[in-house]
Image (cartoon, rainbow, N blue to C red):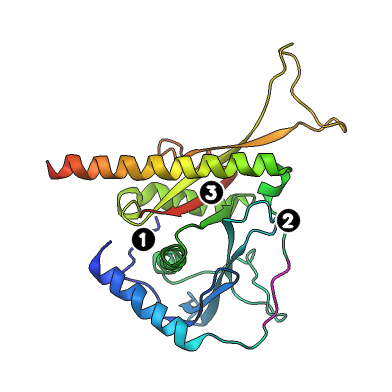
Amino acid sequence: MVKIDLGNTYELVNTSLSRENTKIDFFSPQSNGASRLIRVEIEPYPDASLPRVCNLAMGPLTEMGYIDDQIRLRHQDRSRVYSTLVFCILGFLDKYPDLKVGLDGSNDARAAVYHGIFLANKNYLSNYIFPVGVDWYVKLLRNRKDVERHSDGEPFFKPISEPFDYSRSRHDLYRYYVVHLNG
Amino acid sequence: MDKKIREKLDYYFKKADESIDQRPRPRTPAKPDSLSSVIRTKRESDLFMAQLDAMANLARKEYLESKNKESE
């Protein structure tokens, strides 16, 4: 279980904070004894129609300088890594309280980590931030036999958000998570 | 917010102001995001943002109510 403690984070070695592009680096010791530089990046959502939602990415850098957020790392202290991540999110939201940070749940493993963190640290985190869960839904037509569809026949999904439901286990993940500041 | 966490944030804000790296860095290419598959129009995005703001207000209200109950 990941236990968030904002008093126990890794030192941030490079911090560049702005609405348009926030980059924060820290080193995370790995179980093999090596230390990996981890970058946290928060950028505006690529679609201009959501100007107050920012995307979060975290991971080591590739040779090209991009964040590899698919790699599996064996951190010595996962709680400290994710405490550092939450600290970065808190810092960003504290600086720009009108913005929200989105966590894409399209990768099940990653979504399960975020979901587990919110579940296990509800009381502690509520002093700083709140999560919102977003699901997709599709409308059942009045004939009760079919659902609303695009012209190509694909179901017409729409987003629906709710305050994070703490009775939902890690087997019932949201599709997307949004974090906003308590303040 | 806990005073020590406040001080820690302020320390890093100051550090960030002093050390902003102005060198051009590679920008991560925009990845397809799952949310973009379900928000297609301005009306949908406006509705989504209004939902999020309502959730934020509700969460804050519930938090304050729970804190008030604790202090009673």
Q: Are marks 2 and 1 in contact (CB under 8 Å)?
A: no
| Residue where numbered disc 3 is placed | A177
Measuring from the top left, give residue A18's x and y in whole percent: 54, 73
Q: Earlier in the sequence, mark 1 or mark 3?
A: 1
3D distance between C-alphas at marks 1 and 3: 17 Å
Chain ID at mark 3: A
Locate residue A17 relative to residue B38 in the image: left or right: left
* Dot 3 amino acid type: Tyr
* Dot 2 amino acid type: Pro
Q: Are marks 3 and 2 in contact (CB under 8 Å)?
A: no
- Does A66 sit above or below residue A118? below
Please tell me in which quadrant of the rendered image residue B68 appears.
top left
Which label sits on residue B22?
none
Magenta part of the chain: B25-29
Chain ID at mark 1: A
Asked whether residue A173 is in view, the answer is no
SS at mark 2 in the image: loop
Which label sits on residue A4?
1
